[in-house]
Amino acid sequence: MGIFSLIGALLAINLSVVSAAGEEGTTLPFILRNENFAFEERVAAVIIDAGQVIEDPSLSPEDFDVHVVSTRMVDPDVVVYDGPREVTGVYTSEVEDWGFPADSGQYIVLDFQHVGWGDGGTTIDSGFYLEAQYTVTYKGDPIATVDGSTITPTGFEQTGVVSPVLDQYEYATSPEGMDYAYFLNDEIDEPLPLVVYFHGGGQGGDNYNPARFSNGGTVWANPDKQAEFPTHVLVPRTPGFQTDVAAVKNVIDGWIAEGKVDPNRIYMTGYSMGSSSTWAFVSAYPEYVAAAIYGAGTGPSNAALVDAVDHMPLWEWVDADDFAYNGVINRYNTWGEYLNDYKLTILPEVTLHDYPYNGWTFDGHSSWLVAYNEYVDDERGTVFDWFFSISKIRGIEDVALDTVSGVAPALPATVTVDVNHNATGVVSEERSVVWDAIDPALYGNDGPGVFTVEGTIDGVVEKAVATVSVEYRNRIGDLNDLVSDLDLNKGNQKALEVKLANAERFLERGDTHQAGNMLGAFINQVEAFSGKKLSEAQAAELIFAAEETTRSITG
């Protein structure tokens, strides 16, 4: 080996030893992991990708300093927070997510307080969505890996922000100039319900904030809720009290036309100023909405509107300490008795018991926090149970009809549908229906005897269902008539007649087995005659009648 080759080999060995002992000058990427809690979206954790599996139980919050600069997304010159963020916990994880600690893993998770004000954790402020830039500094000892090496990070790079639910929302502006956020469930290819959430006052500084503040706009899209209550969500932006309800309706109408939204399961909800927007929409289109949840604001408060929503399912909320309480109670006392499907829930306080709030009591004007997240009513259940149990379609006629083997059932051109009209209540209406094509085998001799067929009803997502019962007749009399009309020699004709006579005689004795054998022999002889002594059409008619008779006597 030459001298230069030897030096190269020694350098390689030396570098290998340095790498095993500790990688100096390592810059590691990290993401922000946001979580939409009940009150607000917050940066729940920083997740560092170490690039290899870490196993170091000595890691602690004291090893990291975190600094945050938060600016408005729509105006980066506005700095809302510039300061430290306290790390409350550190753990390794096998997955790039928050809340999955493990003894070892590729990811180092820096956990923060998930409840706090003025600590740099929020992604919203004064009605605007914030973009946060985190700076992470490592101060600890070299970090041990499972392969015996160490890492000493000297820098960190923020590479992304992940907010699992809110990342599924999109943002748009209607032709009329209305901003809106929306979530469309693309897992189910059929018309789904739609929840329209109107945000409160001061929450619409930009189009990103309304869905992020007090999760009335996002809770419906949480994976556990979507699994049980699949729905689409629309969050219009209402900068002031003048809600462009026509623009909102146009968005919904477009989704209905595209087959995304069930027109009979459109739900409105909003609190404080959002309740005003809810009722602005309902006032303009009182028959459009299937049900509404609202609170801490306005409601139906004049005779004309009360008459228009007399039979709409309604659920109103207020807290006993809400400044809107007296107005709600006065309206309830004045108009509540005229509403046929209305419930007012009065909370003694706005307290959230689930993580991360664990008993934290909020301002009395925040009743929506409890309504959307934790409340279970003795009669109605959760707001999810209640909303998604409601449709303007309250019933569809069960169609039942009979036919005989080989004859297609005569399905009706219309069915009776019970429709809830918000002004008048449930009305039975005749709606046209287009039935699915029926396989003739279903009403043939080998069919199931009873089968169902679905039909598409005009303006209704739910299907009409017709139950068809098929009668199988004893047709020995028909067979005798058919045989007597055949142009056969007397011997062949007599052979067929004898088999039919024997089958009838066995039936009179109750011996269905032998009767079936005779009919089987009859069919065999007809098949032998087919195309020779009988036309194929004649043979087919005789065989069908014989098979129907066999089905009728053998079940």
Image (cartoon, grey):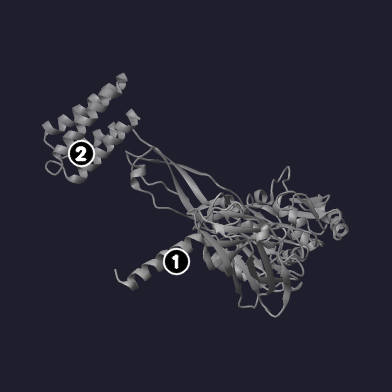
To which quarter of the image does residue 140 belong? bottom right
* Residue that badge 2 annotates: 485
Query: Which residue is rendered at x = 75% and y = 66% of the image?
Result: 200
Judge from the rendering whether residue 186 lies leftward or rightward of residue 475; answer left or right.
right
Callout 1: SS? helix
Q: Earlier in the sequence, mark 2 or mark 1?
A: 1
Callout 2: SS? loop
* Residue that badge 1 annotates: 15
Query: Which residue is rendered at x = 25% and y = 23% of the image?
Result: 514
Report the residue that reaches farthest toward the top: 509
Q: Is residue 458 above or below residue 29?
A: above
Q: Amino acid at mark 2?
A: Asp
* Foreground residue among 445 and 150: 150
Provide residue 252's location: percent of width, then percent of height. 60, 66
Q: Which mark is residue 409?
A: none
- Give me the C-alpha separation between circle 2 and circle 1: 105 Å
Q: Is residue 411 above or below residue 475?
A: below
* Pair 2/1: label in front: 1
